[in-house]
Amino acid sequence: MGSTLDLALLSAAVLGFRHGFDYDHIAAITDITSVETNRGRAMRMGLVYVLGHATMVAILGGTVILFQRSLPLSLDNWAERAVGLTLVVLGLYVLGTLLRNKTALPKSRASILIGSGRWLFWKLGRAFGQTGDKPQQSTGSYSRRSVFLIGIIHGLGAETPSQLLLFLLAANLGGVARGFLGLAVFLAGLLTMNTLMTASAVGIFGMSAAKPKVLRFVIGATALYSVVVGSIFLFGASGLLPQLGG
């Protein structure tokens, strides 16, 4: 029993570490850190995203362990397509902005969503007779609340039932307590990888900031990456993507 549990915990740690390097994590962290001019703030914003993601994973994993039930596959399929559509539309917007304007940098994908949402609510309010000033354009930076919410949403869309079954397996090996131990180990691996990714992204964008052409190239490359990966997610074909990190 001891060796079996140790193997399950080791699998949880490796899976958490590897999952932190998934495609949607790369897109989110690069987007968040690319719009911050201060490296310290960029690092903090990236870590807020990581904490939001880990919070949702903890909730989902805890639910699986407590109720001894796996999550429905339909939840993962729906979330995968929703994330894919967002990545495609907003990635194309960023690329279009870069091509149309040779000097200015595009807004972050999150700021586009936030600004669009405010404009839509303003239009709906006017249609129902409400008055109010037209919402101002977003500055392009993130707030801690919006970054945390992005992490929560990505946590819902990224954790597949097959991964969460690992926590159920750990629980079956020795009860709820050991199931939560497996979950904690998974989260430790996830947090470690995402912290390393955030630090790397901050360093890359920080070095590129002094060279606008290089920065535009990096942002364009990440936007193109979002379109390609988003298209794969949109058609429910994420299983065709090569496994990152082994």
Image: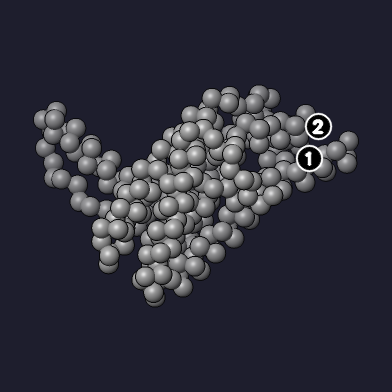
User: Relative to the observer, which residue lies in front, 215 or 197?
Assistant: 215
Which residue is labeled 2 in the image?
173
Q: Nearer the viewer, mark 2 or mark 1?
A: 1
Q: Position of residue 163 (x, y in %)?
A: 66, 36
Residue lying at 52% horizontally and 52% vertically, measured from the top left: 26
Q: Which residue is mark 1?
A: 8
Q: Amino acid at mark 1?
A: Ala
Classify 149 as above or below 43.
Answer: above
Residue 185 visible in the shown view: no
Q: Position of residue 6 (x, y in %)?
A: 83, 43
Q: Residue furthest bottom?
A: 210
Residue 175 screen position, x and y as percent: 77, 30
Front one among 111 and 171: 111
Looking at the rendered structure, the kind of residue marked 2 is: Leu
Nearer-N-terminus badge (2/1): 1
Identify the image quadrant of residue 170.
Answer: top right
Q: Quadrant of the N terminus?
A: top right
206 in relation to 108, above or below: below
User: Which of the two residues, 236 or 204, is positioned nearer the viewer here?
Assistant: 236
Residue 131 seen in the current view:
yes
Q: Residues within 10 Å of mark 2 (few under 14, many from 20)?
A: some
Secondary structure of residue under mark 2: helix
- Give the image location of residue 15, x and y in percent: 69, 45
Query: Residue 108 vs residue 27: left or right?
Result: left
Numbered-mark total: 2
Query: Which colouring convention does the figure follow?
Result: one colour
Q: Residue at x 37, y 64 (%)?
A: 216
Helix, strand or loop at label 1? It is helix
Tags 2 and 1 touching, CB below 8 Å: yes
